[in-house]
Image (cartoon, rainbow, N blue to C red):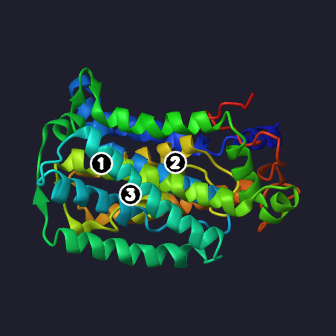
């Protein structure tokens, strides 16, 4: 019975994050009765969106394996925010049909560069994306040396509601729809295969370099959406906050049950991890706890998530340092990890 329960948990590594999300939601409601009020949802979702999108942007690279942690996500989303608020809007390009495609194109370009560095030139992911991090941070400071505020119709609406729908919800749903659509292709199966065992995937005919380039490009696109979400939530841009979302995004991915070794995890878990980070912050604010303790709380939860993930990965019949066999599906097989956002290929 105990082994059956553990197997169920292993097949849904986001289960711990889901329980913690529910617990923090209840705690926030008890600490501030207006937290879950209908009128609070647009603001809450607008504040959650940058966290959630940054975590989703980090996920594809992590799933691709080879230590695929993209630390340029934070500077990229911040650069998009700076670009929109500091250049596009002041120069009279304040249209959603101009600004969003430019932002997405920038995100895709930066992501593709990261993918080429990792997939073709075989840079270690942290090293390759660190180089890009420095470039993006410098470009952001060159564009906008000082923080500035700038509002425009579509950006203001996106930070609140677009018609009856909260703008933050729209932005969060875009990557979810894209990820679900990819479930109808062979890409996600290849991504899990490459992340679980790239040599086996290569031997089976998977183009490992191409899969990793697409994974990083996808992360860049999601990061661009995160930058738009940040600009909408704050109605401003601050070039000095380039790395603000980098470590929280990685922590959210790990808390959501995605293995930092690659090949195991889900976008759904990353969203839950981001919700945990966001609600932990709002709970401490509601309790008037010093923000200095926020990093401590992040660290404690992250350690707990990593310990739990290690325990679940190193169950009976597994060595403690190995990637679970279930995380390395062969091409043509659906990933064995249960992903609520997975749409089986036809």
Secondary element type, mark 1: helix
Residue 106: mark in rendering: 3
134, above or below 93, in the image:
below
In-front residue for pair 200/41: 200
Choose the circle earlier in sequence order: 3 or 2: 3
Left/right placement of residue 189 relative to residue 111 reads right
Q: Nearer the viewer, mark 3 or mark 2?
A: 3
The 10 Å Cα crowd at callout 2, few under 14, some 14 to 19, many 20 or more, is many
Q: Quarter of the image for the N terminus: give it.
A: top right
The picture places residue 312, in percent across and down from the top left corner, at: 72, 53
Find residue 122 and report its image quarter.
bottom right
Residue 237 visible? The answer is yes
Tell me what residue is drawn at x 61 percent, y 33 percent: 340
Tell me what residue is drawn at x 53 percent, y 79 percent: 127
The 10 Å Cα crowd at callout 1, few under 14, some 14 to 19, many 20 or more, is many
Residue 226 visible? The answer is no
Left/right placement of residue 56 relative to residue 278 reads right
In-front residue for pair 23/105: 105
Mark 2–mark 1 distance (CA, rounded to whole Å): 19 Å
Secondary element type, mark 2: helix
Tell me what residue is drawn at x 34 percent, y 68 percent: 243
Choose the circle earlier in sequence order: 1 or 3: 3
The picture places residue 25, in percent across and down from the top left corner, at: 38, 37
Choose the circle earlier in sequence order: 2 or 1: 1
Q: Mark 1 points at which residue?
A: 228
Asked if disc 3 and disc 2 are in contact, CB closer than 8 Å, the reply is no
Q: Which of marks 1 and 3 is in front?
A: 3
Q: Mark 2 points at which residue?
A: 270
183, above or below 191, in the image:
above
């Amino acid at each position: 019975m105990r082994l059956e329960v553990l197997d169920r948990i292993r097949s849904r590594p986001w289960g711990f994050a889901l329980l913690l999300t529910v617990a923090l939601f209840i705690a926030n409601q008890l600490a501030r009765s207006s937290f879950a009020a209908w009128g609070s949802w647009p603001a809450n979702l607008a504040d959650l969106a940058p966290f959630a999108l940054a975590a989703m942007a980090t996920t594809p690279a992590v799933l691709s394996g080879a230590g695929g942690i993209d630390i340029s996500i934070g500077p990229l989303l911040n650069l998009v925010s700076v670009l929109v608020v500091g250049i596009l809007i002041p120069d009279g390009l304040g249209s959603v049909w101009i600004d969003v495609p430019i932002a997405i194109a920038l995100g895709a370009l930066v992501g593709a560069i990261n993918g080429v560095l990792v997939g073709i030139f075989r840079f270690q992911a942290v090293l390759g994306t660190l180089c890009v991090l420095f470039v993006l941070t410098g470009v952001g400071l060159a564009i906008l040396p000082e923080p500035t505020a700038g509002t425009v119709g579509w950006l203001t609406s996106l930070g609140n509601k677009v018609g009856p729908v909260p703008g933050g919800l729209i932005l969060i749903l875009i990557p979810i729809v894209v990820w679900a659509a990819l479930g109808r292709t062979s890409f996600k199966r290849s991504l899990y295969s490459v992340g679980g065992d790239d040599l086996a995937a290569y031997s089976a005919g998977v183009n490992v370099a191409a899969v990793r380039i697409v994974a990083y490009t996808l992360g860049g696109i999601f990061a661009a959406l995160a930058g738009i979400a940040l600009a909408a939530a704050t109605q401003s841009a601050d070039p000095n906050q380039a790395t603000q979302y980098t470590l929280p995004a990685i922590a959210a991915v790990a808390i959501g049950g995605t293995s930092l070794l690659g090949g195991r995890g889900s976008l759904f878990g990353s969203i839950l991890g981001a919700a945990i980070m966001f609600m932990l912050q709002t709970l401490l604010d509601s309790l008037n706890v010093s923000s200095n303790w926020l990093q401590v709380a992040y660290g404690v939860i992250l350690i707990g998530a990593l310990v739990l993930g290690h325990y679940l990965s190193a169950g009976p019949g597994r060595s403690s340092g190995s990637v679970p066999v279930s995380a390395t599906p062969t091409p043509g097989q659906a990933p064995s990890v249960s992903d609520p956002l997975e749409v089986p290929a036809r």
